[in-house]
Amino acid sequence: MAGFTFLPMSHDHDHDNDLDPMAARVKALETILTEKGLIDPAAVDAIVETYEHKVGPRNGARVVAKAWSDAAYAEWLAKDATAAIASLGYSGRQGEHMQAVFNAPETHNLVVCTLCSCYPWSVLGLPPVWYKSPPYRSRAVIDPRGVLAEFGLELPLTTNIRVWDSTAELRYIVVPLRPQGTDGLGEDELAALVTRDSMIGAGHALAPGAAA
Ligand code: FE
């Protein structure tokens, strides 16, 4: 991912400390909460482990592949994304109320959380660093076309861009356009074309043959 200018971090090399300021703050908070008996570090580790390694964008990719393959499912997803997604076994933490927004040739959808970093963990895993960065959060709203161009997504001027602001109550998944030349593909092969960024709106789904 190129293009975003992140706020400069201050590095204080007087301290013999590998943690960046945010990581240090998180560590300090965790220590205090553990000492007060409010959290169990093993439980925290288990949650992080789950979202880093077990839950990831492939859940969302299954949702998109099914929507591409099954018109009735796509209709359900459009009407009640929370239920349609839960039917595949993806629900819970940070994904309770979902809305699916469908890209079309004339409309492209982009998701942001201007306030903080609300993100549908249950279908996309942990948010990418850029999603949480102040430049993305402000510029996605002010200049979505420019932001998309920095992701390498040059959309025709005739394509409208809709920006969706996530909240703690409502999170979004973008259903990207189904790539051309995928008519004969099954859901597994289709899911392999669905990238994390395409489900945030920051990319297209991959062309067949481009999947890793
Ligand atoms: Fe947020």
Image (cartoon, rainbow, N blue to C red):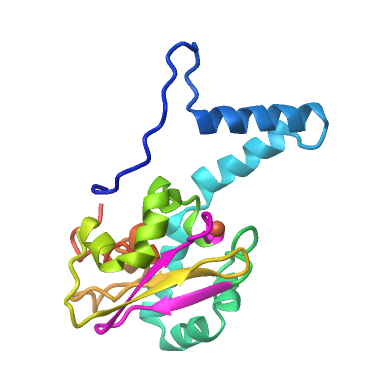
Is 210 positioned to the left or the right of 160 in the image?
left
x, y percent for residue 90: 57, 64
The front one of 5 and 19 is 5
The part of the chain drawn in magenta is: 98-122
Is 4 positioned to the left or the right of 83 in the image?
left
Q: For residue 145, what is the image quadrant? A: bottom left
Q: Is residue 31 above or below residue 167?
A: above
Q: Is residue 48 above or below residue 17?
A: below
Decide whether residue 151 is among the magenta residues. Answer: no
Indicate the quadrant of ligand 1 in the picture: bottom right
Q: Is residue 111 visible?
A: yes
Residue at the far right: name it.
37
Decide whether residue 99 is among the magenta residues. Answer: yes
Is 181 positioned to the left or the right of 169 in the image?
left
Which residue is pictured at 50% across the width and 53% down the height? 125
The front one of 118 and 90 is 118
Q: For residue 110, what is the image quadrant? A: bottom left
Which residue is pictured at 25% across the width and 84% down the height? 106
Q: For residue 209, what is the image quadrant? A: bottom left
Which residue is pictured at 41% across the width and 45% down the height? 129
x, y percent for residue 170: 58, 70
Q: Is residue 59 above or below residue 63?
A: above
Q: Is residue 201 visible?
A: no
